[in-house]
Image (cartoon, coloured by chain):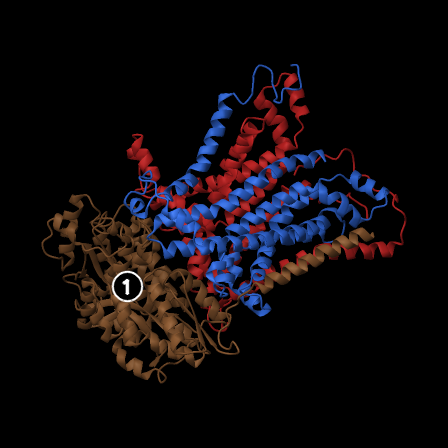
Chain colours: A brown, B red, C blue
Amino acid sequence: MNRARITRVGAVAAASALAIGGLTACSTGGDSGGDGDGVTITWWHNATADPQKAMWEQVAQEFEDAHPGVKVEVTGYQNEDLQRTLIPNALQSGDAPDIFMVWPGGEVRAQVEAGYLKDLTSVMSDTIAEYGAVVNPWQVDGKQYAIPYTFGSEGIWYNTDLYAQAGITSLPETLPELEAANDKLRALGVAPMAVGAGDLWPAGHWWYQFALASCSTDTLKTAIPALDFSDPCWVEAGERLQDFMATEPFQEGFLASSGQQGADSSAGLVANGNAAAELMGAWNAGQIGSLTPDATIPSWLGWYPMVSIPGAAGDPGITMGGGDGFGVSADAPDEAVELLKYIASVDVQKRFAATNAGVPAHPGALEALTDPSLKQIGAGLAEASYVQLWLDSDLGPAFGTPLNQAVVNLMAGTGTPEDIVKALEDTAATL
Amino acid sequence: MTSITQAGPATTAGPAAPTRPRRRRDTRKWLEIALFAGPALVVFVGFVILPVALAAVYSFYNWNGLGPLERFIGIDNYVRALSDSLFLQSIGNNFLIVVLSLLIQGPLAIVVALLLNRKMRGRTLIRAAIFVPYVIAEVIAGLSFKLLLSPRGGINAFLTSIGLGDLAQPWLAQPDTALWVMFGILTWKYLGFAILLMLAGLQGVPEELSEAAAIDGAGWWKIQWHITIPLIAPTIRIWAFLSIIGSLQLFDMVWVTTKGGPVGATSTMATYMIQYGQANPGYGSAVAVILFLISLVIAVLYQRHAMRRDLGTSTSRGDD
Amino acid sequence: MTTTTVPVIEPAGQRFSWRQPIVYIVAATAILVSIIPVLYVWISGFRSSADLNANPAGWPDPWFLGNYVNVLTSPRFWGSLLSSTLVAAGTTLGVVVLGICAAYVIARYEFRGRQWLYTFFSAGLMFPLTVAALPLSILLRDMGIHGTFLGLIIPQVAFALPVTIIILVPFLRAIPNEVEEAAQLDGASRVGFFWRIVLPLSVPGLVTVGVLAFLNSWNAYLLPLLVMAAGGMPQELWTLPLGVQQFSTQYSQDTGAVMAYTSLAMLPALIFFLAAERRIVGGLTGAVKG
């Protein structure tokens, strides 16, 4: 080797070392707990759009102001990324955020069994008492592991103008009435209903509703925890759905439509008047509103409860709903619990209600709702004989994709009602 | 990227270099090998092989991604995957795309490259334009095509405007058209890469050969078929290899555009893995291992037989 | 046939210059088909979202500059731009350096296990990144580089090595033995041969793998999501694809803004490619003559 080359190699090596050093220094790794002179709390949620995103940021700021020395790092992530990738990865690798979104039913159960969540039963007993029964889906073995901030039921969002134009004078209350209304809408040239079957779960919800209508409440209460689907009502649900599909209620190309993103999603189609109605949860007011030209909830948007099915065994007073909540990581600092108490306080809940992003979980905040549809939903929840959690939430994360895929197959004409039950049984067998 | 035909048998290099003791030469050789290949090997093993091996371990467990690995179930995940009709359909889709790519994209790229392989006005512009689809991120390309192909999107609007309104349909929403349309999108995205690769290979073809043949009276196509194409054979082989593996691993474009729908029409092994593996990483890992094994077998077979010459598996290179 | 100054081949009986219609048609079709979807996104950025949602397939009417202005004045866009550039440059550097060294050894040294080494590296192509994601993030966390640029660059280099080596090895093998023997006669060592002759000769190949590595890094989504987003880096420093996704879900109702953002996010990669393009194809020609 000659000297010139050694020098050159050495120079390159030194430059690389400097660069690498610079790159590691550029890190801003988010550690939680213990900055030396104060506490940092990390908080992850799924609001990527205002006003909800701004609201959470404000809540964080207010908490910081009230607790000097505490810093709150709050970030909103896209829902799918958060639920399927970011949170599971963070939990598994031991660096979970202090406060994060916890989904009810099977998911919270799985997280508790792995020891990731802090037991809130005693430290937040006052808050829990304030909320009442709505916290139940986030309990495991009688202990509370997360507090919901929104809970709403599902119903049919519709365009009052289009319904009036089609000559529908009274809102459908039974399935035959819905089918008749759909015929009138089709004559108008719009899609009577929209569904985002491309995302799978919006289609799944239709089958869940038919299952609720076909199965008695007792069956639901026992079959789901036991994962026993031998009751014929589960097949019946698929058969009824098949009959409904034969009336061609949905928009063209529904198999590939997304539920919420863009002008051709089911929400978008309703927003721009190309579809007259869609079955969705309480968040849909805000969702549809965001897809309108002026980004506000349209005045023509209305809501009515899901129709009942005459002759079916299910209880017509039952309703299906779900919600979102926040939990605290097992090794989070105590300040995190304080923050959650603040988030769950009735004042913050009222502000949430005022944004009309959904129905607040706290009973005391319902009065702050201004949107008439959301008010209807809140009232309906209170009157329901039984509130069933979204079936895929209740069953657990392993069921979501196989079940929803089987429902879409049925809607596409390639699957049978028995296939849906088989998907459920196969998944249950793997647990 | 061409292989230059070596005239005559490889000659063993005689002791032309000053003789050094053999042992020191050997040690030095191994030292150089370690120094040169070492860093790449370390990074590769540490950040690819290791995580992947870990994932393979997961495949033998029933695991929901949280908590410790506890429930060893042997090959149950594998059995489950291989008996799932959707997974089998995905495998079929992958192989269909492999075949379509080789049969359609390959010849198309070669022909276009042959036609464009001349000094023409705007040559740089053409080559740049052709490569643009490859440069665009999958997220962006997928979003664009979803919008173009939606029932009220650009393509249907265009068809209606030129009087072919009857052809307007929800392209990506119908199980029978979705896969073919998907292949069209893939061709759009990756054909430019193939063309550029072929063009690069063509640079190595000496013009004198074609000119000589032309003087002898051969037509254009005959020249290409008998002279040019055989000379870019190594390039074609490399492209084919990358294309096969890429088709087997297909994920990004499909996920962003259709997520494998509708009803599995465009499902690939990788989209199936993500869809069903998120709740059960053990199962997802098993699917990944199956994908890996299929790719590996095909790759090894291909390298053994089709790419012998390019890799110099012949042993007559003999020097130290 | 006469002059050799005619740059094109003139087979008997068939004039085949660029004026031949079929070449012209092929070229025009190729350009149009390649560009139109991209143009669609660009032009849609000039429409307001209300316009877009009402009529996805129309022409801007009126031309609306607000989307592009908003994106160009947002610090998040420029921060993401910087971040993507940094990560892509680092990845490219790592890939090229490690790749050429390893490829040189595989291509030109004779040793037991050489074929195995090549197959070992190319086996890396067979595994999708998605499966290694979870163990990889645990590994990065253990090494303490999770949530740093380095934590993103090194795995990207690792996953880019297979393609790089696959492309470079045949390239390097093509250098004739005679050249190497001549260098040895001149008294150069193996390493000297590498430094002085192989490297300059392989510049075209290096440019090719460099461009590929750069583009792949630029467009990557999953790994940045795991390392940067889950690692807690501030959103201003996320790479562009992450930024596009975050932007599109945050403003999903604002289709026009999303179009503008994605159009601008495309630009740097396009510009880089255009700048490098001459060197790739031109350089690959040089490889043969060199």
**Quarter-of-image position of residue A147:** bottom left
Viewport quadrant of the C terminus of chain C: top right
In the displayed structure, B29 sits above or below B7; it is: below
In the displayed structure, C251 sits above or below B124; it is: below
Q: Secondary structure at mark 1?
A: loop
Horizontal and vertical percent for residue C187?
A: 86, 45
Locate residue A284 relative to residue C113 in the image: left or right: left
Horizontal and vertical percent for residue A367?
A: 20, 71
The amino acid marked with disc number 1 is Ala
Along the line of sight, the residue nearer the viewer: C157 or A369: A369
Decide if residue A132 is in sight here.
yes
Locate residue C197 relative to residue A34 in the image: left or right: right
Q: Residue at x 14, y 62 (%)?
A: A311
Horizontal and vertical percent for residue B84?
A: 42, 56
Q: What is the crowding at mark 1: few (fewer than 14 residues within 10 Å), some, or many (at least 20)? A: many
Viewport quadrant of the N terminus of chain C: top right
Q: Chain of mark 1?
A: A
Q: Residue at x 54, y 23 (%)?
A: C18
Total labels: the figure holds 1
Q: Mark 1 highlights which residue?
A: A357
Horizontal and vertical percent for residue B93?
A: 45, 47
Locate residue B119 relative to residue B175 in the image: left or right: right
Decide if residue B89 is in sight here.
no
Along the line of sight, the residue nearer the viewer: C67 or A200: C67
